[in-house]
Amino acid sequence: MLDYVWLVPLFPIIGAIINGIFGTKLSKKTVGVVACGVIGLSFLVSVLVFFSLLQLPPESRSFEKIIYTWIAAGDLKTTVGFLVDPLSMIMMLTVSGVSFLIHIYSVGYMHDDEGFKRYFTYLNLFVFSMLVLVCANNFLMMFVGWEGVGLCSYLLIGFWYQRKEPADAGKKAFVVNRIGDYGFLLAMMLIFVTFGTLNFKEVFNIAHYNFQVGSMVITAITLLLFVGATGKSAQIPLYTWLPDAMEGPTPVSALIHAATMVTAGVYMVVRCNVLFTLAPISLTVVAIIGVVTAVFTASIALAANDIKRVLAYSTISQLGYMFLACGVGAFSAGIFHLMTHAFFKALLFLGAGSVMHAMAGELDMRKMGALKSHMPRTYWTFLIATLAIAGIFPFAGFFSKDEILWNAFQKNTVLWVLGAGAALMTAFYMFRAVFMTFHGESRVDEEVAKHLHESPSVMTSPLVVLAILSAIGGFVGIPIIKGANVFHDFLAPVTGEHLAGSAKVTLTNLAYASSTAVSSGEAVHHPVGLEVLMMAISLAIALGGLGLAYYMYIKNPSLPKRLAEKFKLLYHLICNKYFVDEIYDFLFVNPIKRGSEILWTFFDVRVVDGMVNGSGRFVEFGSSVLKRIQTGYVQNYALSILVGIGAIIAYFLFM
Amino acid sequence: MNQLDFPILTLITFLPALGVIFIMLMNKEETSTIRWTAFMTTFINFLFSLPLFFYFNAGSTEMQFVEKASWIKEYGISYFVGIDGISLLLILLATFFAPICVVACWKDIKDKVKEFMICLLLLETGMIGVFVSLDLFLFYVFWEVMLIPMYLLIGVWGAPARRIYAAIKFFLFTMFGSLLMLVAILVLYFFNHSVTGEYTFNLLKLYELSIPLNIQTWLFLAFFLAFAIKVPMFPFHTWLPDAHTEAPTVGSVLLAAVLLKMGTYGFLRFSMPLFPVASHDFIPLISILAIIGIIYGALVSMVQKDLKRLVAFSSVSHLGFVMLGLFALNIQGVQGGLIQMINHGLSTGALFLIVGMIYERRHTRMIADFGGLSKVMPVFATFFMIVTLSSIGLPGLNGFVGEFLILIGTFKSNVVYAVFAATGVIFAAVYMLWMFQRVMFGEITKEENRNLKDLSLREIGVLVPILIFIFWIGLYPKTFLGKTEASVQHFLNEFNKKYEASIQKKDNTHAVNKTEELIVKK
């Protein structure tokens, strides 16, 4: 079955082609069935491939399928090829699985939209690109997927292109992503020049055997790659596009801007863990950017009133967590959080979409409240997701977040303190959202209130499935107990992290194993008691956030307002997202625009063309002077001949 | 070597000229017959050019399909044509675009149809002639021949307001460069005679000359000016926006798709092999001008209000990439530059066709006059989007293949150049998407746009063939890169060989002078 891995991305593109070309002739129902069907097939194949992979012994779970040679010139040879290993497997399953659920949800959500067919064409195209990204066996193929998801994100953010905001937001997303891609592109060139290949396995093997820890060139490569990651995964300083991306349809926010595409940067860092491990400086940068982003954007979410914006900032913050994990060398913890986050964040967005559906598109939480009784399914699933993201035992987020914090703690206490601070804020703003939306008094407009209803089952069933996953998904990665962290062990051949029991060094994973042997060895020596204590602390933090939100939004609903008045300046700053967009406009966008204007009107039109036209006018002027000599009178010409002869004679006589 | 035993290059070059004779015999009222004749001529010519591709021996580094006949014996002028991997794709590009252009202007040109088609066909002969000539004299003849129909296309059928200015500007710029080139050709010719005692314009023989560095530099500069204006490289580009803007649609298409490539082709075919040392010495200058062109073109594109002018400036940016790749002087760079010439032809050609299509409907090219067209023209929107993405260099479409190879090649030869050039990737996304957004997205603000008709079958037929190649090159570039690789490798080998030989010679003479000095001193 491994040989058929190419079917995984193939099905979605077939769907996109069918709906893209014949969509106008098909009924909405057929379009929906085709779109969901192909993703379902893709998921099915992923599962089959997964079982084939499990048949293999852990050390040989790495399979490459080359389709054909793509771009080749001289010693450069790149292929269209796929790589199946535990890492890409987890990504494939997560991407195709979550996509499938969101496709089904979308059938209900987008039902009355006139762009129904266009929507599903783009959505299928997105899944195709995302699967190419995660299945690629080389950097260039990954870049194909990388740009492909960027394009689909652009198209889907700007889906309602007739309004200005979505169109602007789409363009902003694409351009900011391109700035990141610039880093990726340079990294690829440097990789090719350094290693002579772009194939993952070859690059990682050469890097492992021929380069020292701290090598300059590897540090440069990894930093450039990370620039790419900050673009796609919305980290400081390139995160500003993601909040605006909420202009797109909500299922798109769930799929692209929460569960899958934005995690591509994390995936890329983990994929290149061999390189990053060789570059401690880069790892430090990754950890710092990650944790600072986590704290910074969580603080913006504290005061946001638009439910989707809260979730958007929360996404950025959670992605920061994942990078923090990578930065402290806990790559599998990063991927673990990526997976659980995909479940609960997709669920949160879909839940928000369900609320919007009921509220005629209203996003402002100040105009919600007490929706619990009107939409129980949405409420309960949303609550489960909130418990998960807040990190309450035993929901999925608890396990993944705790693993990250524990790893950060071992590395550096400051990182842990910041991470824990972000966790506190996360619990607070998520429960704040729950309380403002579903509890308390109803602040819903009367007109809207009449039509409040639970969403149809085509929308709520995906919610239920995701809720189950959010609730129990964490149990694949139980800490402390030996052998219970199945997730970690499954990924070990790729990430090189080994638990005491499973440290089997074999030929294929030798490359990865020894590089991290030291750090994993350390991990084992920590007393179990400390780890349990840290868990208790992080649980306490989550509950603290919950309690604070309860106190402020249920017990004393007037308190937030008073606080806002008291700390006016701070509140103002946070409400305006620290004015980062305005600063960027001032520093980059406007100068470039104005500068270009000057280049054109001054340099091009005045200087260059001025010279051209000037030389033309000079000739014209010259001839207008010279033409006076051509009088047409014979005597004038005779005179000039005479003068000429005289001059010649004079020359010969006197010189 | 001529594997077909048939003068196929002559046929392809002069078939359009034959069509001209037929059209001349027709009554100018019979516009339909004239159009059909022009279409059949160009289309059959395209079919005739296909065997070039299929019979082309990709493994050989020699000139292929060669024909040679003495023309003016006393002066060593011959009719000498042949192609290698460097010219193959460019000829196909020309024969491919000719029928597309005839169909594209079917409804657009109503005035002086007969003369228009005559110009178009003559232009095709000129373009192909430039790419097949292996005799410098013959090359120069075609180079000049092709100027005249283009001049007329702009001057007669252009947008009334500024067409004369644009046409004269185009003509003078090109003429200025090519006159200096003529002088250089003559110097080369006489220099060759002084060395070998033979008068010849045969390019392959002139390749074997080793020219002293100071002469090389001057000759290189003369050729450089001619080609740099044609490319156009910054700062010789200002004729291009005017010519593009004022030219009729198909004039812009051919100008962008084929004519500009004569400049870049000229560097590969003439400047670099003839003057390797000078070429090598000028790498920094040319690379820096190319990079300025990439960034400058992109920035200035961004602030254009006229669609055609925007696309014209984007050409300056794209051709900067091509020049950078060629002067990276390694296999990735040159291969990338070569395929990017084709890519630019396809995507910019298609962009001008697309702009022409809305111009036909609205008679304006101002971005501000549009907005919200996606709503009324969904099919058009799809085509426009794909072509825009191709121009931006989205992986999977053609533009990426060229850009990536060029950047890899540049990076190998000079990291700093690559770092600066790659910023063009960001800017391209900015100006193209912003333009697309203003034209296609948003609400319809102008009443006139509310009832625009979507593309007709004819217009779809014009764009689909281009789109096929946009995807083909993007997904499976091997078909094309495979044909050119051997020739490019040969070109590079020869270049390096000659360059090293001249350097050694310089060192030797230097050494000889030194010893002589020593002897004298003693």
Image (cartoon, rainbow, N blue to C red):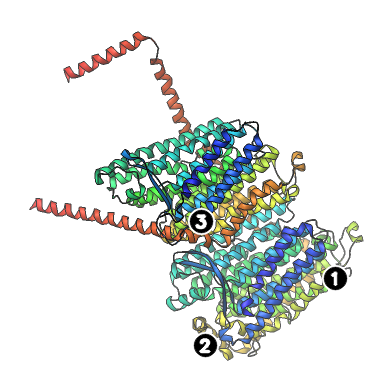
Task: Give the residue at x 38% y 9%.
Answer: A633
What type is the residue that disc 1 sits on?
Ser
First in sequence: mark 2 vs mark 1? 1
Residue A334 is situated, as x and y percent measured from the top left of the image, at: 62, 75
Q: Nearer the viewer, residue A431 or A399?
A: A399
Q: Nearer the viewer, residue A410 or A75?
A: A75
Q: Which residue is mark 2?
A: A505
Q: Which residue is mark 1?
A: A457
Q: Residue furthest right?
A: A450
**Helix, strand or loop under label 1:** helix
Q: Nearer the viewer, residue B183 or A121?
A: B183
**Helix, strand or loop under label 3:** helix
Q: Residue furthest top?
A: A635
What chain is tagged by disc 1?
A: A
Q: Which mark is residue B53?
A: 3
What type is the residue that disc 3 sits on?
Phe
Evaluate whether residue A352 shows in this view.
Answer: no
State which mark lies toward you, 2 or 3. 3
